[in-house]
Image: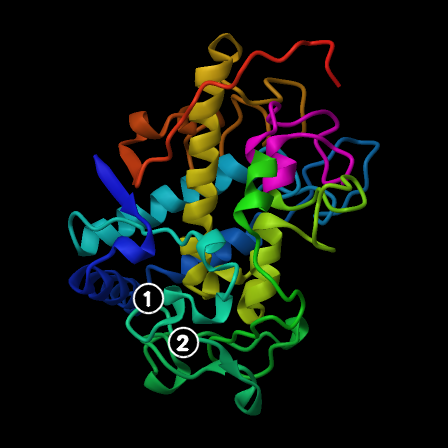
Amino acid sequence: MNIRKEIRKLSGPERLAFTNTLLALKGNGGYDKYVHWHHAVMVPTVYPDEPQDPDYRNGAHLGPAFLPWHREMLLQLEADLQAITPGITLPYWDWTLDAADPTNSPVWEQSLLGGDGDAADEFRVQDGPFAYRYGNWPVPAYPEDGLPGAGLKRQFSRLVNSLPTAADLQMAMNEELYDEPNYTSSPFNRGFRNRLEGWITQKGDPQVTTPGSQLHNRVHLWIGGNMLAMTSPEDPVFFLHHCFIDKIWADWQAQMMLDKPALAPHYCPMQDGPTGHNYDDVIKPWTRRIREVMDITALGYAYEPASPLTKRPFKSPFMA
């Protein structure tokens, strides 16, 4: 069983092994395909009467496949890393623990991912193993995304000024439906997936306390730089972020199995949904189907520390 730990639980040697293995994968040419895959999935997966636009829904975002697609991507990366360093696992970054002081999160320490970019140097990251000046993590320029010049870029807190809190995350955990038709990113579209992806804003829910994008999306925006575009896996923090997103989904799945086991697999659509988002659809460009990535135990991994679960009290179906 592969155990994925929160970054604060990594020992010094574990941190070094993780960053060195990422650098080795980058060096042997095995990393850049993840950037390509994430960018290439940006094709519309829409109904005939919907906008033919990947920003409306695509194979990995703005729809139900958001969580299964990224779970499979994490599995692919973990396998590639283990081919270099047997037994290594992906860590996750619980950003709710850093909401009070995100700039000083341990994820940005020199021994892990390095810190913010320097505005005087086109926002290139200046320290840590992935800094441009060391030449070990080549990232091309993306002038079309406002990122001229090569090198890993970050722009902390320029588009949103805070990370999500534990209270923000709890609103997602309180959702009892995975998704609902028409499976969009509307702020009025209920469900765990849409809430966690970050599309349920103050416009759709007055309980949301911060303006703009939430949860998953908000973290991308707070980090900025290369995390702003669909080539966001250029920044290795992408995977630590999505590993936490995957843990949140696994925690929600476990909670739903405790509360409503008869309604498993706690996913929709089962069929007749947008192409690539149905329960039996293949997760492209790979071979597994969505139904095959629903159970992390069957997939051979777990998260530590485990989140405590308590069966929720009965709620009357007549209660709004």
Asked whether the residues under the numbered discs 1 and 2 touch, taking CB atoms below 8 Å apart as contact, a structural biologist would say yes
The residue shown at (64%, 27%) is 179
Say left or right for 184 vs 120. right
**Quarter that holds the C terminus:** top right
Q: Nearer the viewer, residue 10 or 210?
A: 210
Image coords of residue 157 (percent x, y): 60, 70
Q: Which residue is mark 1?
A: 26
- Give amino acid for label 1: Lys
Main SS, magenta residues: loop
The residue shown at (49%, 16%) is 259
Which residue extends farthest bottom?
120
- Give amino acid for label 2: Pro
Judge whether residue 181 is colored magenta: yes
**Quarter that holds the N terminus:** top left
Point out the stretch of residues depicted in magenta: 173-196
The residue shown at (43%, 61%) is 237
Mark earlier in primary sequence (1, 2): 1
Q: Nearer the viewer, residue 35 or 202?
A: 202
- Categorize mark 2 by other alpha carbons within 10 Å: few (<14), some (14-19), many (20+): some
Q: Which residue is mark 2?
A: 138
Image coords of residue 116 (percent x, y): 48, 77
Image coords of residue 158 (percent x, y): 64, 73
Which residue extends farthest right?
49
| Disc marking residue 206 | none
Q: Tell me if residue 129 comes above or below residue 79 in the rendering.
A: below
Q: In the picture, residue 132 is in which quadrant?
A: bottom left
Residue 36 appearing in the image? yes
- SS for dot 2: loop
- SS for dot 1: helix
